[in-house]
């Protein structure tokens, strides 16, 4: 990387000073009556990387923000000690904080697009902190900006300095953001989920960059939910849970011999290298509903039908392929007459009862493929066949009757629910669409029973029925989404990044649920994800997409054990792994 | 719902236990409702007062709004005449209370006409394809080219002054704005993920329109309408003030404001109190609209 020979950003050589870059003792942060960080102590030496790992709500981000005096309005911050480079910053005034931020501590956030002003060239953004904190004149500032841009590995800094954030790729944007944080050469860099929104290959590059920065003598506090990412560059890992640090140690200690149950749970939930069909989350004892005579005919009918489905005695159709894509092409016209080949000559086949995983980075055409498979977008050429019969070639009116055979699970599941409806209404509508006889009042009870059964299938309590999806947690929402997809008793489920928005342990539960349902209901799954670990865990067959094409396809074992295409090899090499 | 009770008996479910961290247990809309602010309570009370005034004015002001008493003309506010009297000795308080009905009826019906027309135009533009959309949009642009009040004046010029014309005129002149908003909302809802999800479930286009698109498009109209009533009342009062709306001696606020204009230096109360009520009603409608909006967003 060109950064290697770039200007050194570290403090002048001569051995790091003995003061720690960051010292925190017994930090607590509360909002009103709620304490979200309890008694956290951290110490970070120059040139060291400490990672705080935890799931959403564990208090890791609030901890990081308190170190910048940004805990938020109404936050009560207390600590026995809170010092940056040996100077106490406890109870600093806002204007005193402003002088320190950027100079003593830099911050890199996850959402680079939101963190950069879309209307200003990145050079101006980076130059801001120089203008505020130094007396450099314009020319000197420009030189420094180019220096840091080169140091973060942006090729051709002169060219990129004039670009706005919208003109940069995700990885370039993240680099620009890191450059802005490094402009003043702060002794401490706080990075809050710096790679979460990035593709694996880009993530690997950004992690390399952070490693370099650390080696130049900057202390890095890395916040992440991902143990695998963190284990690559952290010198020490602190696991946070419920506002406390429950475990600290070197990556070898924490990952090799986790002592706290929360750490063990998080480790077990990582799907990378876990064979297909193995559970990722501990089984929670579920009492089966007691058999009562109150189960009425509709329910009995339903159970019978499901048993039939599970034993493969569905009304026979000719093909043993659930879904088949043949030579699909789709182009989109961009602005200024550009043509984008979103999907080029893509063919895939999904055998019945199996899972086909499609993996690729953002922009590789995965989602367009899903939309083609759902017949939401018409292909320019090629055809999708469903159970051996025409599907994409049908006019929508005829296809509508067959739509119940295909369910869809979405990444942004909240947006896929009508915001006016409660969980009960969402499921009742879905049941009614699938079984028109339920719609007239006579079969209302059967409909209600079906809604209850669906909820039971996805492991949710009926007490959630009258809530709205906005009031549910991410995992619960996705379960409702799956229940809705199952309402029509589909044979095929098309899942587009169904777990990407979830915490690892919740992701594990949802993946386990999909796996269970697949076996129970004999479902065929088209599973789309950017996450190689997830794909490896769920798939029988894998198709790797790159730039609109399927570059490699085969059984999961074959593709992951012996990838033949260079892109697949690069992709696999970039996956962060637990040690 | 015995079936549900059965399933309820199955206690520990994995889904209930996932990520309790962000499953906010006491989230605002599932817990106690958002507490109304002081402004909202005041606006609610004022709305109640105006409603009583409109439905049963004699309850609040037992006198006759048209009763003339030349001997006590131009009386300043006093214990016997709270808001003073006008040039004919009529009690301004009684007349202001009596005028509430006209103002509210004009405001509400004008808004309904505007919203109704807007909803029809907006829905037609948003659903019937690009050609219709293009035509309706150009038509709306022509209407937008006129300031709203000018459009209303034009209408009255053609159909003659009066309360009825004022209602239709104000309704017509607010319709283009509503149509634009409804069309935009419709397009936004139509391309939303949940409409796509309904398509995937196999719902027909007509049922998607009726069940998902229209309700989600029209729900914000409640807010828009409440906000619009305040504006419509001001506009209707403006027309009456110009002598183009309700005609004297009707106790309409705009007309009363106009009548007091001649005596503004000697009898300020003649214009002040009707004006005050126009302002209060408009503020009240706006505050209520905002309150509804805030609650809908939380729901």
Image (tube, rainbow, N blue to C red):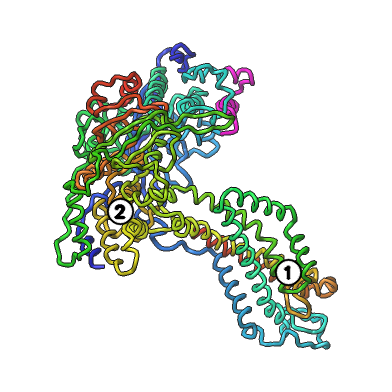
Q: Secondary structure at mark 1?
A: helix
For the point 57% across and 62% down, the residue is: B289
Residue B87 as seen in the image, left or right of residue A386: right
Residue A393: image x %, image y %? Answer: 39, 41
Chain for disc number 1: B
Residue in front for this viewpoint, A139 or A1: A1
**Magenta stretch contains residue A119:** yes
Mark closer to the observer (1, 2): 2
Q: Which residues are magenta?
A: A118-143
Q: Quadrant of residue A278?
A: top left
Residue B99: image x %, image y %? Answer: 69, 77
For the point 20% across and 49% down, the residue is: A309
Q: Secondary structure at mark 2?
A: loop
A91 versus A401 height, above or below: above
State the residue position of label 2: A487
State the residue position of label 1: B237
Residue in front for this viewpoint, B234 or A546: A546
Residue B79 as seen in the image, left or right of residue A449: right
Neighbourhood count class around disc 1 (C-alpha, 10 Å): few under 14, some 14–19, many 20 upward: many
Marks 1 and 2, how far apart at CA = 56 Å
Q: Secondary structure of the magenta portion, mostly?
A: helix
Residue A482: image x %, image y %? Answer: 31, 48
Residue in front for this viewpoint, A66 or A299: A299
Q: Quadrant of residue B78?
A: bottom right
Can residue B82 be seen here? The reply is no
For the point 50% across and 50% down, the residue is: B190
Label pair 1/2, CB-CB below 8 angstroms: no
For the point 67% across and 54% down, the residue is: B140
């Amino acid at each position: 990387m060109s950064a290697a020979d770039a200007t050194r950003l570290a403090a002048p050589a001569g051995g790091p000073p003995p003061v720690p870059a960051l010292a925190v003792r017994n930090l607590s942060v509360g909002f009103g009556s709620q304490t979200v960080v309890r008694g956290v102590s951290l110490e970070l030496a120059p040139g060291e990387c400490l990672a705080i790992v935890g799931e959403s709500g564990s208090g890791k981000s609030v901890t990081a923000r308190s170190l910048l005096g940004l805990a938020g309005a109404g936050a009560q911050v207390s600590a026995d000690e809170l010092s940056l480079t040996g100077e106490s910053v406890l109870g600093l005034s806002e204007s005193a904080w402003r002088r320190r931020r950027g100079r003593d501590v830099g911050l890199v956030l996850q959402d680079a697009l939101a963190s950069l002003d879309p209307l200003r060239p990145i050079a101006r953004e980076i130059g801001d902190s120089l203008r505020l904190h130094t007396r450099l004149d314009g020319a000197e500032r420009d030189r420094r900006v180019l220096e840091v841009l080169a140091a973060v590995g942006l090729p051709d800094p002169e060219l990129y300095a004039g670009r706005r954030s919208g003109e940069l790729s995700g990885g370039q944007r993240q680099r620009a953001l890191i450059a802005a944080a490094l402009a003043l050469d702060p002794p401490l860099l706080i990075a809050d989920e710096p790679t979460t929104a990035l593709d694996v290959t880009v993530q690997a590059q950004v992690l390399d960059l952070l490693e370099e920065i650390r080696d130049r003598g900057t202390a890095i506090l890395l916040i992440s939910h991902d143990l695998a990412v963190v284990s690559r560059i952290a010198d020490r890992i602190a696991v946070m849970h419920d506002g406390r640090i429950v475990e600290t140690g070197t990556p070898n200690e924490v990952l090799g011999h986790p002592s706290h149950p929360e750490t063990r749970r998080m480790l077990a939930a990582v799907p990378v290298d876990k064979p297909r069909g193995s559970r990722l989350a501990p089984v929670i004892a579920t009492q089966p509903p007691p058999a009562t005579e109150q189960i009425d005919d509709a329910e009995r009918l339903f159970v019978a039908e499901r048993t039939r489905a599970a034993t493969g005695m569905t009304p026979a159709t000719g093909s043993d392929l659930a879904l088949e894509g043949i030579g699909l092409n789709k182009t989109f016209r961009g602005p200024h007459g550009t043509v984008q080949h979103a999907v080029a000559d893509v063919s895939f086949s999904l055998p019945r009862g199996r899972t086909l995983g499609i993996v690729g980075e953002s922009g590789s055409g995965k989602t367009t493929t899903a939309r083609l498979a759902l017949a939401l977008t018409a292909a320019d050429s090629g055809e999708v066949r469903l159970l051996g019969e025409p599907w994409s070639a049908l006019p929508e009116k005829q296809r509508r009757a067959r739509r119940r055979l295909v369910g869809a699970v979405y990444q942004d599941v909240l947006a896929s629910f009508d915001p006016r409806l409660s969980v009960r209404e969402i499921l009742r509508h879905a049941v009614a669409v699938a079984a028109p006889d339920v719609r007239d009042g006579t079969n209302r009870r059967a409909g209600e029973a079906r809604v209850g059964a669906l909820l039971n299938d996805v492991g949710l309590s009926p007490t959630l029925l009258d809530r709205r999806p906005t009031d549910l947690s991410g995992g619960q929402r996705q379960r409702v989404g799956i229940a809705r997809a199952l309402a029509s008793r589909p044979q095929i489920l098309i899942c587009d990044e169904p777990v990407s928005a979830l915490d690892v342990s919740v992701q594990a539960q949802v993946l386990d649920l999909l796996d269970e349902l697949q076996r129970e209901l004999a479902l065929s799954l088209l599973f789309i994800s950017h996450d190689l670990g997830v794909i490896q865990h769920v798939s029988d067959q894998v198709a790797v997409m790159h730039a609109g094409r399927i570059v490699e396809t085969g059984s999961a074992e074959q593709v992951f054990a012996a990838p033949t295409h260079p892109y697949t090899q690069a992709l696999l090499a970039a996956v962060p792994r637990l040690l | 719902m015995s079936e549900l009770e059965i399933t309820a008996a199955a206690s520990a479910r994995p889904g209930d236990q996932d990520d309790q961290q962000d499953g906010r247990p006491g989230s605002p809309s599932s817990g106690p409702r958002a507490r109304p602010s002081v402004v909202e309570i005041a606006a609610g009370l004022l709305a109640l007062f105006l409603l009583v005034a409109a439905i049963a004015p004699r309850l609040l002001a037992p006198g006759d709004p048209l009763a003339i008493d030349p001997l006590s003309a131009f009386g300043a506010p006093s214990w016997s005449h709270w808001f003073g009297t006008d040039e004919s000795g009529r009690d301004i308080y009684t007349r202001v209370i009596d005028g509430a009905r006209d103002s509210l009826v004009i405001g509400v019906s004008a808004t309904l006409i505007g919203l109704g027309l807007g909803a029809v135009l907006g829905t037609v533009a948003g659903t019937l394809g690009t050609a219709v959309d293009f035509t309706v949009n150009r038509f709306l642009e022509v209407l937008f080219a006129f300031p709203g009040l000018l459009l209303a004046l034009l209408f009255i010029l053609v159909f003659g002054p009066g309360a009825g014309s004022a209602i239709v005129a104000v309704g017509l002149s607010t319709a283009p704005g509503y149509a634009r908003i409804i069309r935009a909302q419709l397009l936004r809802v139509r391309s939303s993920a949940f409409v796509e999800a309904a398509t995937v479930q196999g719902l027909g286009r007509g049922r998607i329109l009726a069940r998902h698109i229209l309700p989600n498009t029209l729900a914000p109209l409640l807010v828009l309408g409440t906000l619009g009533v305040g504006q419509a009342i001001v506009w209707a009062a403006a027309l009456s003030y110009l002598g183009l709306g309700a005609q004297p001696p009707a106790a309409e606020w705009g007309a009363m404001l106009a009548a007091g204009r001649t005596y503004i230096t000697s009898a300020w109360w003649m214009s002040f109190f009707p004006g005050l009520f126009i302002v209060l009603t408009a503020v009240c409608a706006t505050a209520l609209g905002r309150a509804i909006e805030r609650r809908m967003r939380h729901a």
